[in-house]
Image: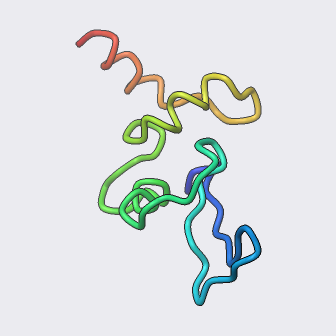
Amino acid sequence: MSCPYLSYRESAQGKSFDEARAYCDAAERFVQPMRADVCNDRFELDHRTDCEIYVEHATDDPAVPDPDPDATLEAEES
């Protein structure tokens, strides 16, 4: 499952792109491809635990599932 805040846009501010670019709705900005890899849970990454933007905003947004409770518990114990 990819991050619910990730979208791909083919245009912005009156300009169009050759290819759609990754956009983070939580941060309200375009993100680098490496950030989009986290959003898409690639390379054994998980946006619910590996993305500080998601973690920060998911706790404030009731429509977004809570981050992995095990990961939250581990972070609190550290």
Residue closest to the eye, 44 or 27: 27
Q: Residue at x 66, y 49 (%)?
A: 25
Q: Residue at x 31, y 55 (%)?
A: 44
The quadrant the N terminus occupies is bottom right
- Is 62 situated above or below 76? below
- Is 16 situated above or below 42? below
- Is 36 situated above or below 3? below
Figure quadrant of residue 10: bottom right
Most extreme residue toward the bottom, as rendered? 18
Most extreme residue toward the left, as rendered? 78
Q: Position of residue 41 (x, y in %)?
A: 43, 56
Q: Position of residue 19 (x, y in %)?
A: 58, 85
The quadrant the C terminus occupies is top left
| Residue 4 visible in the current orientation | no
Q: Position of residue 59 (x, y in %)?
A: 61, 23
Q: Position of residue 11 (x, y in %)?
A: 70, 75
| Residue 76 visible in the current orientation | yes
